[in-house]
Amino acid sequence: MALPLLTLERQERIRALLASDGRVLAADLADRFGVSEDTVRRDLRELADAGQCQRVYGGAVPAAPREGKLSERQRIGTSRKSALAKALAQTVEPGALLFIDAGSTNLAIAEALAENCGLTVVTNAPSIASALMERCGIETILLGGRVDRGTGACLGPKAMADASLFRPDILVFGACGVDAEQGVTSHVLEEAELKAEIASRAGRILVAATTDKLGTASSYRVVPTERISLLFVENDCPATLLAPFKSRGTAICHAGPEPANAAAAQRRAPR
């Protein structure tokens, strides 16, 4: 008879399964290891406390990556974020009211917007407002509130009150994690609340996510996957990561070199 695995051995195998399968179920792990579900849940709780997974109903998924402050995130994966930004910017109709929330990928999106397009851009990110301030043909509105150094966003009651004034045609989300079952999630409660408030009145929701954020979740849910009108992913994003989204009918645009790619995906996206 095989000896039962020690706690550290079980947790190492759980980490490996999360890396290979993208999610684990407590009941399946209990059968696999020959232990109780309470023991597995304790393992998952300890892994979650260490930032190595995110617990969800019935199991766990990989934890959304934490990349540090905005100034640090801006230096990571710049070419990947630039490709995503260009693909998304192609789908923004001239004259739209566009809300862009904080994030390093979203900053790249703001910089990729065409000049003289008649856009009104509302943002809670001072860095995005600064990037657009001298762009011709783009009106920029910055929400007030406390500036959170970690997210680079204006948050709190003032930002929430300002956000309630707008009904954006298009909302561009910055996402800490994007999972087919858990939806768009955030590390920060105040940020999640603000995103959800804006999303409740948005016409379309666009999300640009680097590959490391797909299939991961953070602590606070923003919107379900079904609310995403168009998901922008890297050109070489593995099909296994996208399959759960496609099974739910999510419209996906690969940020490839072909200019028609984004336009074709936009035609397929729900309105």
Image (cartoon, grey):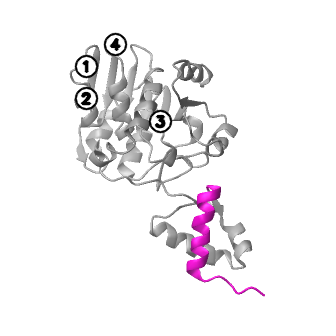
User: Are the two marked residues, 1 and 2, in contact with CB atoms closer than 8 angstroms?
Assistant: yes
Cα distance, mark 3 to mark 2? Answer: 19 Å
- Amino acid of disc 3: Ala
> Would you name the residue on which mark 1 appears?
135
User: Are the two marked residues, 3 and 1, in contact with CB atoms closer than 8 angstroms?
Assistant: no
At which x and y percent is residue 74? Answer: 32, 42
Specify start and end residues of the magenta stretch as a single range: 1-22
Residue 184 visible from this viewpoint: no
Q: Nearer the observer, disc 4 or disc 1?
A: 1
> Would you name the residue on which mark 4 appears?
118
Verify whether residue 21 appears in magenta.
yes
Verify whether residue 72 appears in magenta.
no
- Residue drawn at x 61%, y 48% is 181
Q: Secondary structure at mark 4?
A: loop
- Amino acid of disc 4: Gly
Of mark 3 and mark 2, the one earlier in the sequence is: 2
- Amino acid of disc 1: Arg
